[in-house]
């Protein structure tokens, strides 16, 4: 994508953070999803960079952000984001987060609400849908001992053909491959103590999320993802949910112009309420 991006790095206490930057105006900070990096947001930034100052960092442990051996946590990612914004003197920002980035963005807004003008969360992680604990444990098994699990799944293929379960085995193998593509995401989501992950979930704190928030959710996403977005919208006092047709979890890549329009309309509304000027795509 031919965008005049400025690529930069900064050394923070936990590692070196890489980010992409473009534009001028109100500040939008884009936080990518679990299995991606900041390049995920480039199709969306293309439509926003004329009117907004866009920052897209690689989260700590992802993409070109370099770290030593760390025990990743949401708290660590939030602290890293705080140091990054402080170093760049970005005191008033809008946070836009997808999946894991949504969890980090919402956690940041709970801790540093005075810095966050608004949140846009796309299929956010960070809450557990009722009755979905089994799904989490299944995903944990896929990454906890990957070679053993892979061997078991491969050995089950012939039997699966007999009872028509070959598709299930193939889906599990594909999911394992995706999960293992991002070691930092695996650790954040699955490879920590269950109690530690539970302690960073946000359900019990969402009623304290006073920041204006827009939740964007694809209608063809998984029932679990849709349930998480509904929880955010129901529990956060200033949240609104917008369902988007014909798309699943890959909103930024699949419908970048639609996502950009929703971001612009949301940010423009907040700016106008504060007595400023907003708007872009008519």
Image (cartoon, helix red, strand yellow):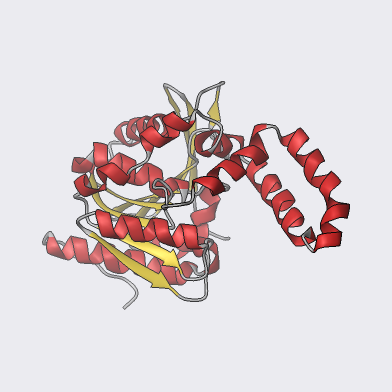
Q: Residue at x 82, y 56 (%)?
A: 160
- Residue 161 placement, left or right of 183: right
Q: Position of residue 154 (x, y in %)?
A: 83, 46
Residue 22 vs 143, above or below: the answer is below
Residue 52 as seen in the image, left or right of residue 136? left
Query: Between 117 and 184, which is closer to the camera in this rendering?
Result: 184
Residue 234 vs 6, above or below: the answer is: below
Q: Residue at x 53, y 66 (%)?
A: 248
Rendered image quadrant of residue 253: bottom right
Kindly give the residue lying farthest to the left in the view shown: 275
Residue at image point 25% right, 36% down? 111
Whether residue 19 is visible to the viewer of this picture, yes or no, is: yes
Pinpoint residue 97: horizontal percent, then vertical percent. Answer: 41, 51
Name the spot of residue 66 as percent of width and height, x first. Answer: 55, 29
Name the outermost residue toward the bottom.
282
Q: How many marks?
A: 0
The structure residue drawn at horizontal position 69% and vertical position 45%, both measured from the top left corner, is 176
């Amino acid at each position: 994508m031919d965008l005049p991006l400025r690529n930069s790095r900064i050394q923070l206490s936990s590692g070196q953070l890489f980010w992409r930057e473009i534009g001028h105006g109100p500040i939008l900070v884009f936080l990518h999803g679990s299995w991606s990096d900041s390049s995920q947001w480039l199709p969306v930034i293309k439509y926003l960079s004329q009117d907004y100052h866009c920052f897209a960092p690689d989260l700590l442990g992802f993409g070109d952000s370099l770290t030593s051996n760390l025990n990743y946590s949401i708290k660590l990612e939030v602290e890293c984001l705080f140091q990054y914004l402080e170093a760049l003197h970005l005191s008033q920002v809008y946070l836009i987060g997808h999946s894991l980035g949504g969890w980090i963005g919402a956690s940041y807004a709970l801790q540093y609400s005075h810095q966050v003008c608004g949140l846009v969360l796309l299929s956010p992680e960070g809450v557990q849908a009722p009755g979905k604990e089994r799904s989490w444990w299944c995903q944990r098994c896929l990454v906890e001992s990957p070679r053993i699990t892979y061997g078991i799944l491969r050995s089950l293929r012939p039997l699966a053909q007999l009872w028509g379960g070959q598709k299930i085995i193939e889906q599990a193998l594909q999911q394992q491959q995706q999960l293992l593509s991002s070691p930092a995401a695996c650790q954040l989501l699955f490879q920590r103590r269950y109690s530690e992950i539970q302690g960073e979930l946000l359900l019990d704190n969402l009623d304290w999320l006073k920041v204006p928030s827009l939740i964007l959710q694809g209608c063809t996403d998984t029932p679990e993802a849709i349930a998480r977005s509904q929880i955010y919208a129901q529990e956060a006092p200033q949240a609104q949910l917008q369902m988007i047709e014909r798309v699943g979890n890959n909103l930024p890549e699949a419908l970048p112009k639609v996502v950009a329009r929703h971001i612009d309309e949301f940010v423009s509304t907040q700016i106008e309420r504060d007595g400023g000027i907003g708007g872009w795509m008519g």
